[in-house]
Amino acid sequence: MSPVTAFLTDSTICIGCKACEVACKEWNGIKADGLEFSGFSYDNTGAVGHSTWRHVKFVEQGPVIGLGGNALEFPAWGFSSDVCKHCEVAGCLEACPTGSIVRTEFGGVYIQPDVCNGCAYCVVACPFGVVERNQSDGRAFKCTFCYDRQKVGLTPACATACPTESIKFGEISELRETAQARVEALHERGVEDARIYDPRDSSVGGTHSIFILRGDPRTYNLPPQPRVPGEYMSAGWTSAAIAAGAMLAGALIAFLGDSRR
Amino acid sequence: MSIGPKPPRQSRLPDAASEARLLELRREAEQRGMVTSAGAKPAGAPFPQASPEAGYYGMPLLKKPGWSWEVPVYFFVGGAAGAAAVIGAMANWTGADKRLVRDARWVASLGGPISTGLLISDLGRPARFLNMLRVFKVQSPMSVGAWTLSAFASASAASAFAEAVDRRFGGLMPVRVLGNAAEALAASTGVVMSSYTGVLIGATVIPVWNENVRTLPLHFAASGVGSAVSVLELMGHDDSTALNTLGIGAAAYEAYEGLHIETHPTAANEPLRAGVSGWVTRSGGVLSGPVPLLLRLAALSTRGETARNFRRAAAMSTLVGSFITRVAWIMAGHASSKDYRLPLERGGAKQRQELPPRSRQQEKELLPRERPDKPHGISK
Ligand code: SF4
């Protein structure tokens, strides 16, 4: 049986070199996004999307003494490489009407490009804002978890290219232990705000992209309580059933009550 | 052309006010670490910072819905067609006027292919529409909708066809039985057509949509019934009491829905009340709720040509209002997806209401930023 794999992205040792971003684009043959100056630190990419599957966030914060790694007087400057979370309960996968989005034998969430018909429903089903439709190609794209590389026993491109091993790749339960040990070690060294981001107590039920962050995950645009659309389903269908009943009953009553039928 | 600063004064005598001002500047610098004053601030300052409150530079966390204009139009046409099938079936079963049955069947059967066309043209890969029918997934409202639409389009077309054959060749028993069976199927899928779109957008991660998942299917169904009634009235059935009754019911629900939105000023509902999407929502609500309601009630208390005029006005108002309402919900969804604040709030929808309201100043500071629009390069 194939192992269930995961990414562990350790932001505390990320140096913001963007090797992962470049490696991802090169391996997967994704076009450049163009050159725009965002004004947000060294980040002109913005967010993961249809043409960016790994994205390094440059988190510039107010000067907090001791946060940021360098000398005390410098403002905090953190980096974190973002990616599809490969959710345990994936909104995109559940929403996909064609069965194009599947769970692979490695536990990742994969869009089969030859099946996707571009309905864009996965886009509004992802609580992390990852998957996006490419308007000129028509289909939805996101990180494939390097399904092609994993199938031949290789490590995903981003993890292979990462010079500091900030992106670790491996068996999921082992990586969860690694993450725990790393955070404990950081706490011992006085980095008290280090934490694991793996929303297992939310309806996403955990991810295959675990992060070690410093401080509040919201600073990284990571929702503390991601909610999959499945949560709203029963309320929605109940209302639809009431609506259906009301329509049938209403029309029946209206015609029965019409004396000139 | 910009006017340069005034030339500096040649010399000046110090006075109490000038010295007090210098001390004030010194105090401000001491206390705040910087002095903020026009000219001392570079353009764009204060520079954006990432923080738990402002998220990642205020950039949208969610992706905006990728849908184009076809989707709201589909909601409108599909909703009206579904309701028309129900009206036709009920009119038939209760033995109402034959012309009404026939016209309702035709409206439903025309709505089927138009809806299908709209749905297909919104796909990024229209040629792959049939992939929708590769699998059936109850957990995906899009899948349920695609199957429902297919069944509805076939059944309503069959019932209209049977109607035509029946009329041409007169009272053929098997044709009539088949037509009625198709009509029953069209009506039972029709109720889904009118209401499922509410679940389709309600069961998503877009805050303004999932906040209203409980009322959206009812709202869309009422909107669909209102427009089906209106289309039939404008086709000449403006003397059917049953249609007016149905129209009153739909308009009353729409009025209630508008009231519901106005009285639930949650953070997630903001796009329904503020900005462009707010005004579009309001105008759609007024045109499909209170306006036709009053006109239809007026029609009840008058008779003859006056009543008909009231009803025709109500019908037109409802159609325009229903269409605007669908557009408004999509616009609100776009606005909502740009607001990074809601998905970042701990606990999401359930706890949203309990958060203390933000002050105006806070609101301004936390204003969401546009994600720089990237040209869409072709992947692969
Ligand atoms: S993060 Fe979004 S795109 Fe990735 S698996 Fe989860 S729902 Fe799907």
Image (cartoon, coloured by chain):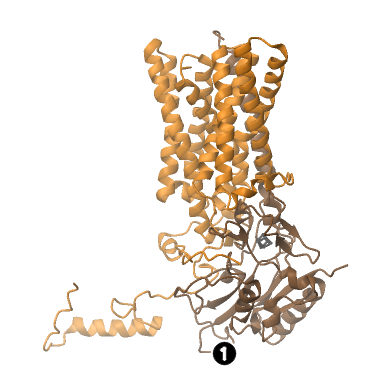
Chain colours: A brown, B orange
Which quadrant of the figure has residue B291? top left
Give the residue type that dot 1 points to: Asn
> What residue sits 61% from the left and 53% below the top?
A118
Residue B120 lies, with reference to residue B38, above or below; the image says above
Which quadrant of the figure has residue A137? bottom right
Residue B224 lies, with reference to residue A120, above or below; the image says above
Q: Position of residue B312 (x, y in %)?
A: 41, 22
Q: Position of residue B73 (x, y in %)?
A: 50, 40
Farthest residue in the right direction?
A1
Which quadrant of the figure has residue A124? bottom right
The quarter of the rendered structure image containing the N terminus of chain B is: bottom left
Q: Is residue A55 visible?
A: yes
Residue B150 lies, with reference to residue B24, above or below; the image says above
Q: Chain of mark 1?
A: A
Q: Is residue B221 visible?
A: no
The quarter of the rendered structure image containing the C terminus of chain B is: bottom right
Q: Nearer the viewer, residue A50 or B302?
A: A50
Q: Is residue B264 left or right of residue B134?
A: left
Q: Is residue B23 left or right of residue B287?
A: left
Farthest residue in the top direction?
A260
Q: Position of residue B54 (x, y in %)?
A: 50, 68
Q: Nearer the viewer, residue A144 or B331?
A: A144
> Label 1: few (<14), some or many (≥20) within 10 Å?
few
Q: Position of residue A252 (x, y in %)?
A: 62, 19
Q: Which residue is mark 1?
A: A70
Q: Quadrant of ligand 1?
A: bottom right
Farthest residue in the bottom direction?
A71
